[in-house]
Amino acid sequence: MKKKLIAGNWKMNGSLAGNETLVKGLLAGLGSPACHVALCVPSIYLAQMQALLNGSAIDVGAQDVSPHEVGAYTGEISGAMLNEFGTRYVLVGHSERRQYHFETDALVASKAQRALACGITPIVCVGETLAEREAGKTEEVVKRQLAAVIHTNGHCISEIVVAYEPVWAIGTGKTASVEQAQQVHAVLRAQLKAATPQADRIHILYGGSMNAANAAQLLAQPDIDGGLVGGASLKAADFLSIIASAL
Ligand code: PGA
């Protein structure tokens, strides 16, 4: 069985001093984790993370990447730049970027493509809003979001990580039930299977109010291969406890 992946998403949180305290706390309690661990941090802290995490069991991740290679794109950060700081993963299509930065499925797909071209694993986030769930559109929405990435990336799709994050569960304390989460993960797995014979090696993470209390149950589901953890990744004890439950 493949090792699970627990990725923290710090979002727009952190400070030089606070990051150091948090990472040192994590490293002190980590031991040899049974799963892969990553921290997706604001890009301005990548150099600090590279220094703090060098040689450790925690990989460095970013939260966004430009779909462009280089040039006149003020404010953007390229995959090649992320590479210079040892970035192993990058989030693409997080619901906060889809919502506040109007990222379309096509843009998310091209960001994933750019990341792959730079040898960085894109963590492609998909998920429905509450209105979409209540309208019975959950499957349709997540399949449409993933289809765009599959369409653009062809056989490279086996190199991505998918994160299912129901928008209504993000930062709200409302976790999807294990049944709700597993059901959508199974839909995504089937879609990946139709696209690549290597679908079983693709990690499909659950995200949305995952915490120390609910992680073990979620991670025990057959198609939940890890977690994308926001709020609970900002506290060393909570994040360590989630990591410990990813067996
Ligand atoms: P949350 O965020 O764990 O705070 O709900 C998850 C995410 O948005 O990645």
Image (cartoon, rainbow, N blue to C red):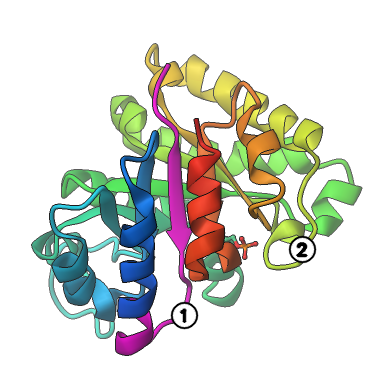
- At 39% from the left and 28% from the top, the residue drawn is 3
Q: Quadrant holding ligand 1?
A: bottom right
- For disc 1, the marked residue is 12
Is residue 5 rendered to the left or right of residue 101?
left
Disc ID at residue 119: none
Mark 1 CB lies closer than 8 A to ligand 1: no
- Sequence-earlier tag: 1 or 2: 1
Amino acid type indicated by mark 1: Met
Amino acid carrying label 2: it is Gly
Side of 207 where 112 appears, left or right: left
Q: Which residues are magenta?
A: 1-19
Residue 173: image tag: 2
User: Residue at 20% across / 52% down in the picture?
Assistant: 56
Residue 214 vs residue 222, the one in the foreground: 214
- Residue at screen point 52% across, 69% down: 235
Q: Is residue 10 left or right of residue 230?
A: left
Q: Residue furthest left?
A: 84
Label 2: how many Cα within 10 Å (few below 14, some 14–19, many 20+):
few
Depicted 11 relative to depicted 200: above or below: below
Residue 11 part of the magenta segment:
yes
Q: Where does the N terminus fall, quadrant-wise?
A: top left
Using the image as rendered, state which of residue 188 and residue 228 is in the foreground. 228
Up the image or down, 53 lies above or below 102; here it is above
Q: Nearer the viewer, residue 191 or 213?
A: 213
| Cα–Cα gap, marks 1 and 2 | 19 Å
Q: Picture coordinates of residue 194 (x, y %)?
A: 51, 16
